[in-house]
Amino acid sequence: MNIKAIFFDIDGTLFNGNGSVLASTKRAIALAQAQGILCGVATGRGYPNVLSLVSELGLDFYVTYNGQYVVYQNRVIHAHPFNEEALNQVISYAKLHHKHILFGAGEKMTGSLTMLVGQSKHFAKLLYRLPKGNHLSTGVKLLKRLAIRRKRRHYPQASDFKEPIYQCILMASRSELTRLKESLTLCDIQRSTSQSVDIVPKGGSKDKGIVALVNYLGLTMHEVAAFGDHFNDIDMLKSVGLGVAMGNAKKQVKEIADYVTADNNHDGIYLALKHFNII
């Protein structure tokens, strides 16, 4: 198997259950890069947030905002922002239903302070220190408590933004998904947590960002491997030459993967790369 680039999801894949990168994962990435294999992330997180989380790894590329904003060796090689009509559609929905919302630009994220706190690495580390099994629900309760104390919200218009917006993150329960899809006809929606969704321009996805980078590098998708665990990784894993689901992945992700490795707490990335003689 002639793999020349490897894409990793972050949460639940590159990160273990404590919100850090295993020593075996760091070693696997270093060994792959030493052989000339490019390594990077494909994530729903924003570029500014990703840099603060994984800068220690010395990655080659960043496919961020679910494929809408791609950076290779500090150069933006693919950018697919909202047009004004689509962005105003998202804003109107948030305003109508009094929703907390974040707006992701290339170099920063703006919007709900409550959600900015939830996106921060410090909040993530706090969650991982809470009792196992309760950390997500407790985190949601903390954010809701903060939200209640911040009743007044300002909703901008698309024309107010000085920079292109690539993704919106909206606080929305599972029961709202049908209404969201019916209302946001110019967008694609992916659930990122039990309490929030990622919203991108119609036709946007992680695999589209990967294809853009692969074409830029002059590679083929058969020369690419990817690791993931969640629903927004499915298209990515199906599109590459080797799609690996983590042992902790959702059932639907495991079903479409080429291979299921150990979970993110038990050297899953390292073991899979060894299994296929990539490192």
Image: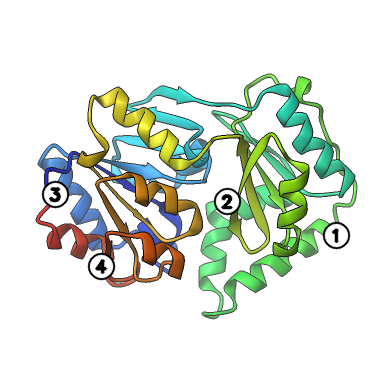
Contact? badges 3 and 4 (CB < 8 Å):
no
Q: Amino acid at mark 1?
A: Ile
Q: CA distance from mark 2 to mark 1?
A: 19 Å
Q: Residue 118: horizontal and vertical position, in percent?
A: 64, 55
Q: Amino acid at mark 2?
A: Ser
Q: Badge 3: few (under 14), some or many (20 or more) residues near its Cα, within 10 Å?
A: some
Q: CA distance from mark 4 to mark 2?
A: 25 Å
Q: Secondary structure at mark 1?
A: helix
Q: Badge 1: few (under 14), some or many (20 or more) residues near its Cα, within 10 Å?
A: few
Q: Secondary structure at mark 4?
A: loop
Q: Badge 2: few (under 14), some or many (20 or more) residues near its Cα, within 10 Å?
A: few
Q: Earlier in the sequence, mark 2 or mark 3?
A: 3
Q: CA distance from mark 3 to mark 4?
A: 15 Å
233 relative to 156 in the view: left or right: left
The residue that appears at 48% across and 31% down in the rendered structure is 69
Q: Badge 4: few (under 14), some or many (20 or more) residues near its Cα, within 10 Å?
A: some
Q: Amino acid at mark 4?
A: Asp
Residue labelled with disc 1: 148
Contact? badges 3 and 1 (CB < 8 Å):
no
110 relative to 71 in the view: left or right: right
186 relative to 210 in the view: left or right: right
Q: Residue 23: horizontal and vertical position, in percent?
A: 25, 61
Residue labelled with disc 2: 120
Residue labelled with disc 4: 267
- Which label was assigned to residue 31? 3
Observer able to see residue 20: no
Q: CA distance from mark 3 to mark 1?
A: 48 Å
Q: Secondary structure at mark 2?
A: loop
User: Foreground: 217 or 100?
Assistant: 217
- Which label was assigned to residue 3? none
Contact? badges 2 and 1 (CB < 8 Å):
no
User: Foreground: 186 or 29?
Assistant: 186
